[in-house]
Amino acid sequence: LRAGLERECDLRQVAERAGASHREHARHLEVQLRQVEDEVRHLQDALNKSTKQAANGQGCCEDLLGQLKAHKQTAEHIFLREKGRVDAIVRLRGVAPQTFLLRAFGSA
């Protein structure tokens, strides 16, 4: 009977140690889970911030492309106007006096 009680006591101690070890392991896993959840939240925040910055950058890029297109059109208009002016001066050089051309079209 005594040997059976000792064996039961030994088994209980082994079970208690195993239970304590499992509880400690479970606490360790819970800590790791909280750390991973915190990291996921941090990464989601960083992703949201990057997404907003990318959208803002895209908007700025589109605005700048619009401005560039407008400047290009203005430059082309000025170029064509000046080319026409120069062509007119060249055509009239043999017909009109130089002083008249300079006054009419400015210096070429």
Image: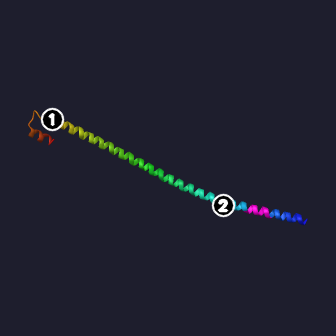
From the image, tell me which residue sits under label 1.
90
Number of labels in the image equals: 2
Magenta-tinted stretch: 13-20
Image quadrant in which you'd find residue 72: top left
Mark 1 is surrounded, within 10 Å at the Cα level, by few (under 14), some (14 to 19) or many (20 or more) other residues, namely few
Residue type, label 1: Val
Residue 2 pos. (x, y %): 89, 66
Residue 1 pos. (x, y %): 91, 65
From the image, tell me which residue sits under label 2.
28
First along the sequence among labels 1 and 2: 2
- Residue 77 versus residue 49 in the image, above or below: above
Residue type, label 2: His
The residue positioned 60% from the left and 56% from the top of the image is 36
- The answer to the question of whether label 1 and label 2 lie on touching residues, with beta carbons closer than 8 A, is no
Mark 2 is surrounded, within 10 Å at the Cα level, by few (under 14), some (14 to 19) or many (20 or more) other residues, namely few
In the rendered image, residue 14 lying in the magenta stretch gets the answer yes
